[in-house]
Image (cartoon, rainbow, N blue to C red):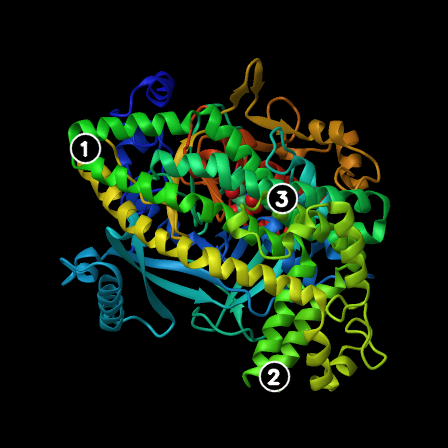
C-alpha cells in the first residue's frame, strides 16, 4: 500500500489514474470510494455523505461563513479552531476578565456565552443541476449568457420545495461548466463553551504561523442551540442544546505514519487549472508586489511593537492579519519555483494540444490576454495593497465616501452613526504617527514601482520614504481623519459627536485635507488608467478559462478532475506523513509537549507557556493522553489537500473517528492552492490527544469529556 502511494504520487506521469496525486477537494457526492479504500478507508462513501440518513456530513458545519467546525457530542458540542473563535472570545473579554489571555471554560451549560450574529450552516443535500441551469444557453456568450444563467438559477430555486428553515443555493463549478445546488440549514444560537489561553491556542503566534514543526493548541469549543423542535431559532434562553443526527466519536489511539486520513470541510478558494502563463504572473509579478508592500509595513510596525507594549497589544491582530497572507505568499512563490509549476504546466499544455489541436487557440488566447493584462494586474496589486497596509489611506477612503454620500444626499442620520461607530473601532487600535510612517513607506514603494503610465500626477514627488515621513507626519498631525487634528475644539478621537455636529464645517475641512486629496488623486488615476482595462480583460480570461477547463476535462480522460475550492463542502484525503522539504532536511509527522518546552520563552508574547501546563509537564501527569513515546502528541501533518476555510475542519481516520483538527499548512507547500505537490504539501492538525489533554488535565472540564464518545 505504502509503495503504491509513493510510486503513484511521485514518479508516475500525468496520465496516472491516481486521483489524489494532484491533491483533490472532492464534492462529497462524488468521492473516489475505491481509491479511498485502497488507501485504507474502512467505511463507505455513503457513510460520509447520505442525504437520506444520518452520515458524517451531519456533524460538519460551516462556522460563521468562513471556517469549518464539527459536532463532537450528542448535545451539539462544537469544535473549531481558536483562531476561528478568536473574535468571539475577544468580544467577551475585558481588561479585568481577559478571556484571550486567561482562557475560558464554562462550568456548565448555564455558563455558556451567547454570540449574537454567529451562525453555523449544515448541508442537508447536494444535487448536480447543470442541465437546468444551462438550459437554453447554447450559443449565448457574455452578458446574455450571464443573464440566462441568473434567470434559470432563480427559477430553479423557486421550484424547490424546502422547509422554512432551509434555503437553496446554486454554485458554479469548473468555471461555469457545471452547477450544483445545496440545501442549507442555518442555526443561529451558537454559544462559547471553552477556549484555552492564547499561550496554548495561539502558541508560537506569527513566528510559527505556517511553520512546521508546530506546537499550537489551536482549538475552541462552542455549542449549537435549537428550539424545542430541534430546529434553528434566534438566540433565546429557552433554546435547548441541538441534538445532531450524527456526532464524531473522538479517537485517542496512537497514530502511525501512513495511516489513512481524510478532512471534511469548507475550503475557500483554489486555482488548480490555470494556464502556465497565469502561474508565471502570480509567481513573478503579483505575489512579489504584494509581498514587497507588506515587507515594509511589517518592518515599521515590528520596530515599534518590540519596544512599546501598548502598541504591541493594539497592533497584534492587525499585524497578524497582514503577516498571515504575506507569509503564505512567500511560501507560495518559493513552492511554485521549487515544484517547477510553470514548466509542468507548459508540458501539460503541450500534451493536451498533441491530443486535441483545438486547444492551441485557447492557450494562445490566454497567453495574449494575460500578457496584455499583466501591467494592469500589477498596478492593481500595488494599488489594492495601499489601504490594506496604510490605515491612514483607508481612513481617507472612508471619509471620502462619507463626503460623497453627504454631497449626493445619500447620507442619513443612521448611516452617519454607523460610520462613527466604525471609526471608533478603527481609532481604538490606531496610532496616527506610527501609521504615517507606514504610509510614507508604502507610498514611496508605490511611486517607485508604478510604471509612468499609471503614476498619478504629483506622486513622483513621493519617491523618497524619508521625505514622505516628514510630509505625512505633518498632514496626519493636523488631520481630522486621523483623530489628531481638531475641529470646534474637539477631535474625532476625543469627542466624535462634537466633530460631526456641524456637518457643513466638517465637510469644508475635509475638502482641504491633503490626505483625502492624496488618496482621491491615487484612486482616480487607478480608475482611469487601470480598473476598466483589468476587469474587461478578466472577463475575456474567464471565458477562455471556462473553455480551457472544459477542454482539459474532455481531453485528459485518465485524470479525475475535482472543481476548484469555492467555499462549498468537500472531502480531501491522504496519509499521515512527514516530509523532506529541503536538501538534507526531513520533518517527522508529529510533535510533542516536550517540544513546547523547548520553544518556551518565559514572558514572551509568542512563546510563553502557562504555569499549569509546565507543572503538568514536570509531573508527567499525562493520563491516557500520552502516546507510546510517553509524551503527549501536539500537532501532526498529512498529505490532505486543504486551504483557507479548512480551518477547524475535522481530520478523520479510516473509520470516521475524529483524530485531529485542521488549522494550517506547512509553508513549503502553500503553492498547493495553485499546484499541489505531494512532496511538500502538508496540512497541519492539532492532535485529539492534545485537545482532550488540555480539556481534562489543564482546564479540568470533565463535564465536557463526559458528553463525548472517546475511543481509546
Ligand atoms: N495560517 C493559518 C490561516 O491561514 C492560521 C492563521 C491564524 N494564526 C496566526 N498566527 N495568525 O488562517
Ligand atoms: N489557517 C487557515 C484557515 O484559517 C487554514 C490554513 C490553510 O490555508 O490551509 O482557514
Which label was assigned to residue 191?
A: none
Identify the residue shown where x is 62% and y is 68%.
Answer: 398
Dot 3: element: helix
Residue 334 at what x, y percent from top left? 53, 29
Q: CA distance from mark 3 to mark 1?
A: 48 Å
In-image side of 503 versus 346 (left or right): right
Front-lying residue, 100 or 134: 134
Question: Which residue is labeled 1 in the image?
Answer: 557
Name the N-terminal-most of marks 3 and 1.
Answer: 3
Which label was assigned to residue 414?
A: 2
Residue 178 at what x, y percent from top left? 24, 52
In-image side of 316 versus 331 (left or right): right
Residue 653 visible, this angle: no
Q: CA distance from mark 2 to mark 3?
A: 41 Å
Which of the 4 image quadrants contains residue 90?
bottom right
Dot 1: element: loop
Amino acid at each position: 500500500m505504502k509503495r503504491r502511494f509513493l510510486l503513484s504520487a511521485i514518479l508516475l506521469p500525468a496520465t496516472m489514474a491516481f486521483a489524489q496525486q494532484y491533491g483533490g477537494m472532492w464534492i462529497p457526492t462524488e468521492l473516489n470510494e475505491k481509491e479511498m479504500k485502497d488507501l485504507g478507508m474502512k467505511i463507505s462513501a455513503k457513510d460520509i455523505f447520505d442525504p437520506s440518513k444520518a452520515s458524517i456530513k451531519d456533524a460538519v458545519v460551516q462556522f460563521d461563513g468562513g471556517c469549518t467546525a464539527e459536532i463532537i457530542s450528542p448535545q451539539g458540542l462544537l469544535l473549531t479552531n481558536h483562531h476561528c473563535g478568536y473574535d468571539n472570545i475577544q468580544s467577551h473579554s475585558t481588561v479585568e476578565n481577559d478571556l484571550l489571555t486567561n482562557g475560558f471554560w464554562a462550568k456548565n451549560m448555564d455558563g455558556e456565552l451567547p454570540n449574537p450574529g454567529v451562525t453555523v450552516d449544515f448541508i442537508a443535500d447536494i444535487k448536480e443541476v447543470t442541465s437546468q441551469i444551462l438550459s437554453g444557453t447554447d450559443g449565448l456568450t457574455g452578458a446574455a449568457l450571464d443573464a440566462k444563467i441568473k434567470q434559470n438559477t432563480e427559477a430553479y430555486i423557486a421550484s424547490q420545495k424546502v422547509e422554512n428553515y432551509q434555503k437553496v443555493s446554486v454554485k458554479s463549478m469548473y468555471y461555469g461548466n457545471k452547477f450544483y445546488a445545496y440545501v442549507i440549514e442555518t442555526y443561529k444560537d451558537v454559544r462559547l463553551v471553552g477556549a484555552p489561553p492564547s499561550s496554548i491556542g495561539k502558541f508560537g503566534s506569527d513566528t510559527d504561523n505556517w511553520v512546521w514543526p508546530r506546537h499550537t493548541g489551536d482549538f475552541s469549543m462552542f455549542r449549537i442551540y435549537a428550539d424545542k423542535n430541534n430546529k434553528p431559532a434566534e438566540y433565546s434562553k429557552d433554546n435547548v442544546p441541538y441534538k445532531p443526527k450524527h456526532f464524531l466519536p473522538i479517537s485517542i489511539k496512537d497514530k502511525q505514519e501512513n495511516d489513512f486520513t481524510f478532512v471534511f470541510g469548507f475550503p475557500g478558494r483554489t486555482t488548480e487549472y490555470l494556464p502556465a502563463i497565469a502561474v508565471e504572473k502570480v509567481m513573478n509579478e503579483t505575489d512579489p508586489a504584494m509581498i514587497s508592500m507588506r515587507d515594509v509595513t511589517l518592518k515599521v510596525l515590528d520596530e515599534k511593537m518590540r519596544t512599546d507594549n501598548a502598541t504591541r497589544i493594539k497592533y497584534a491582530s492587525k499585524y497578524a492579519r497582514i503577516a498571515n497572507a504575506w507569509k503564505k505568499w512567500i511560501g507560495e512563490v518559493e513552492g511554485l519555483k521549487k515544484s517547477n509549476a510553470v514548466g509542468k504546466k507548459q508540458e501539460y499544455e503541450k500534451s493536451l494540444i498533441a491530443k486535441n489541436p483545438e486547444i492551441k487557440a485557447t492557450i494562445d488566447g490566454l497567453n495574449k490576454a494575460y500578457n496584455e493584462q499583466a501591467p494592469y494586474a500589477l498596478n492593481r496589486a500595488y494599488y489594492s495593497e495601499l489601504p490594506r497596509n496604510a490605515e491612514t489611506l483607508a481612513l481617507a477612503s472612508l471619509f471620502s465616501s462619507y463626503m460623497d454620500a453627504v454631497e449626493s444626499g445619500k447620507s442619513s442620520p443612521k448611516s452617519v452613526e454607523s460610520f462613527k461607530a466604525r471609526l471608533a473601532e478603527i481609532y481604538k487600535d490606531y496610532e496616527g504617527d506610527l501609521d504615517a510612517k507606514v504610509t510614507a513607506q508604502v507610498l514611496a514603494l508605490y511611486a517607485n514601482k508604478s510604471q509612468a503610465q499609471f503614476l498619478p500626477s504629483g506622486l513622483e514627488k513621493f519617491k523618497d520614504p524619508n521625505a514622505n515621513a516628514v510630509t505625512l507626519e505633518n498632514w496626519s498631525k493636523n488631520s481630522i481623519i486621523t483623530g489628531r487634528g481638531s475641529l470646534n475644539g474637539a477631535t474625532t478621537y476625543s469627542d466624535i459627536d462634537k466633530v460631526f455636529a456641524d456637518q457643513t464645517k466638517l465637510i469644508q475641512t475635509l475638502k482641504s485635507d491633503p490626505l483625502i486629496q492624496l488618496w482621491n488623486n491615487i484612486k482616480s488615476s487607478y480608475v482611469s488608467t487601470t480598473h476598466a482595462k483589468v476587469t474587461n480583460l478578466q472577463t475575456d480570461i474567464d471565458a477562455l478559462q471556462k473553455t480551457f477547463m472544459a477542454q482539459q476535462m474532455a481531453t485528459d480522460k485518465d485524470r479525475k478532475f475535482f472543481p476548484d475550492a469555492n467555499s462549498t463542502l468537500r472531502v480531501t484525503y491522504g496519509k499521515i506523513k512527514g516530509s523532506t522539504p529541503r536538501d538534507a532536511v526531513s520533518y517527522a509527522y508529529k510533535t510533542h509537549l516536550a517540544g513546547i518546552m523547548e520553544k518556551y520563552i518565559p514572558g514572551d508574547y509568542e512563546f510563553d507557556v502557562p504555569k499549569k501546563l509546565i507543572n503538568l509537564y514536570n509531573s508527567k501527569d499525562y493520563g491516557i493522553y500520552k502516546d507510546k513515546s510517553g509524551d503527549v502528541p501536539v500537532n501532526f501533518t498529512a498529505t490532505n489537500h486543504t486551504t483557507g476555510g479548512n480551518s477547524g475542519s475535522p481530520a478523520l481516520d479510516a473509520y470516521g473517528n475524529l483524530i485531529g483538527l485542521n488549522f494550517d499548512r506547512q509553508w513549503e507547500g502553500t503553492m498547493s492552492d495553485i499546484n499541489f505537490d505531494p512532496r511538500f504539501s502538508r496540512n497541519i492538525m492539532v492532535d485529539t490527544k492534545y485537545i482532550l489533554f488540555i480539556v481534562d488535565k489543564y482546564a479540568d472540564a470533565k463535564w465536557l469529556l463526559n458528553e463525548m464518545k472517546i475511543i481509546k
